[in-house]
Image (spheres, rainbow, N blue to C red):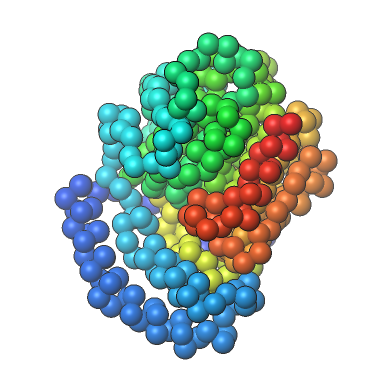
């Protein structure tokens, strides 16, 4: 670990001076970058992609011109637009709002404010940067449920429940703006609690998302009485990073003598599991993924670890760097894990390394690499039928 940490670019480890942006500045920046993208970057990207088509990366060898161009445009757009800069800080009221969703007509969403749990649940990594980050008194969450029945939590303690943690680099998205939570609720006909954890916005940062996920988990197990054996945690990208951190924290609490159940199953889709960005796919797949290159990844790290740069390579943020013995606690609580990555994504190798460490530790683990797919295909590509089918099959296996 020491040798590896020495190789981390010092720009990542430097204390971040990232500050909140105003809504007017954010809107103006968005407009400027959109004009810049469509007026200049998009035509240039199309031309460069066509000229390099014969030299496309191995993971994209089976792609046609249309797929390669659309992926390149998505990558450049993500790199240059507002989705990869901090959003203005949102109030609790704004976080309660329901955006356009993937719920369709068969599913509904029910808002609930989850209250802060007792102080004993926020020790360890949750207490990192205590001077700047405290557990939120209220965490907005949304129950996703089948719309053919009235919403009710009666007998919830005997039902199987999905805890959904959304991706977005810890700086964007809404728990109802990505479809995998809806996919899971629809396929299993189980209730899904989607957590609207605090995003990195120049005010909040790590460990705020972890604290909010802990609040939601304690709400499920202590307030509602759902047994751990009936809980599946699903996360994609940064949400998968949060799912990993949540399980490590639950194991920490148990070591401290706090009585708390652990989940039956954890689904990690395209898990962000190395914030040092040291695995080969970061560079090998930079021309065939939708995610921005390393420079933008480091910006996400700086915003997420604004108050806790020392946590960059710990098991909460970079579990793929650790040997199998770090995951012995996962084995001891008999949790089942499904890890899915896309062959063409820049986070492919770290996801594979995480799955390998879990398997070596004796954790019941399924690993899937979806051929030719990009990062988080389940959520960003409606045509990624194989990735979606694999995600749902993993969920069925995990809850069986």
Q: Residue at x 49, y 55 (%)?
A: 382
> Is 43 displayed left or right of 359 in the figure?
left
Residue 11 visible in the picture: no
Horizontal and vertical percent position of residue 108: 42, 30
**Residue most toward the top?**
154
Q: Is residue 25 left or right of residue 70?
A: left
Q: Is residue 377 left or right of residue 11?
A: right
**Residue 308 position (above or below residue 230):** below
Task: Residue 164: give x, y in percent of width and height.
Answer: 53, 35
- Comparing 110 with 131, the one in front is 110
Q: Nearer the viewer, residue 99 or 146?
A: 146
Q: Can you tell which quarter of the image residue 84 is in? A: bottom left
Q: Quadrant of the N terminus?
A: bottom right
Q: Nearer the viewer, residue 62 or 338?
A: 62
Q: At 66% across and 28% down in the image, what residue appears? A: 263
Percent across and percent down for residue 229 are 70, 23
Q: Is residue 98 above or below residue 170?
A: above
The structure residue drawn at horizontal position 38% and vertical position 25%, both measured from the top left corner, is 111
Please indicate, yes or no, whether residue 112 appears anywhere in the rendered image: yes
Q: Is residue 80 left or right of residue 169?
A: left
- Residue 65 on image: x %, y %: 50, 79
Quarter containing the C terminus = top right
Query: Relative to 281, is 233 above or below?
Result: above
């Amino acid at each position: 670990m020491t040798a590896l940490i020495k190789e981390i670019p010092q720009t990542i480890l430097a204390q971040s001076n990232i500050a909140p942006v105003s809504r007017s500045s954010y809107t103006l920046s968005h407009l400027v970058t959109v004009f810049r993208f469509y007026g200049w970057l998009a035509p240039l990207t199309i031309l460069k992609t066509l000229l390099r088509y014969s030299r496309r990366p191995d993971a994209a060898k089976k792609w046609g011109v249309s797929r390669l161009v659309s992926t390149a445009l998505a990558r450049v757009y993500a790199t240059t637009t507002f989705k990869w800069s901090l959003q203005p800080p949102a109030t609790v009221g704004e976080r309660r709002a329901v955006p356009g969703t993937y719920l369709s007509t068969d599913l509904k969403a029910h808002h609930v404010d989850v209250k802060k749990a007792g102080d004993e649940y926020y020790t360890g990594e949750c207490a990192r940067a205590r001077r700047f980050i405290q557990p939120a008194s209220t965490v907005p969450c949304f129950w996703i449920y089948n719309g053919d029945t009235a919403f009710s939590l009666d007998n919830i303690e005997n039902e199987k429940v999905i805890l959904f943690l959304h991706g977005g680099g810890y700086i964007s998205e809404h728990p109802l703006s990505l479809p995998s939570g809806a996919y899971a609720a629809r396929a299993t006909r189980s209730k899904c609690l989607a957590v609207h954890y605090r995003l990195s916005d120049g005010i909040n940062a790590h460990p705020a998302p972890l604290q909010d996920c802990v609040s939601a988990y304690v709400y499920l197990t202590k307030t509602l009485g759902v047994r751990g054996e009936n809980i599946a945690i699903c996360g994609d990208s940064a949400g998968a990073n949060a799912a990993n951190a949540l399980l490590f924290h639950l194991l920490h609490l148990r070591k401290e003598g706090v009585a708390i159940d652990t989940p039956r199953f954890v689904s990690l889709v395209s898990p962000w599991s190395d914030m040092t960005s040291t695995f080969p796919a970061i560079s090998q797949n930079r021309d065939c993924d939708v995610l921005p290159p390393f420079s933008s990844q480091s910006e996400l790290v700086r915003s997420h670890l604004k108050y806790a740069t020392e946590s960059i390579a710990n098991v909460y943020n970079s579990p793929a760097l650790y040997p199998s013995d770090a995951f012995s606690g996962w084995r001891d609580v008999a949790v089942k894990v499904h890890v899915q990555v896309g062959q063409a994504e820049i986070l492919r190798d770290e996801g594979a390394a995480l799955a390998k460490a879990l398997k070596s530790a004796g954790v019941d683990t399924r690993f899937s690499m979806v051929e030719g797919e990009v990062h988080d295909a389940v959520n960003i590509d409606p045509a990624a039928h194989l990735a979606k089918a694999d995600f749902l099959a993993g969920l069925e296996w995990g809850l069986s």
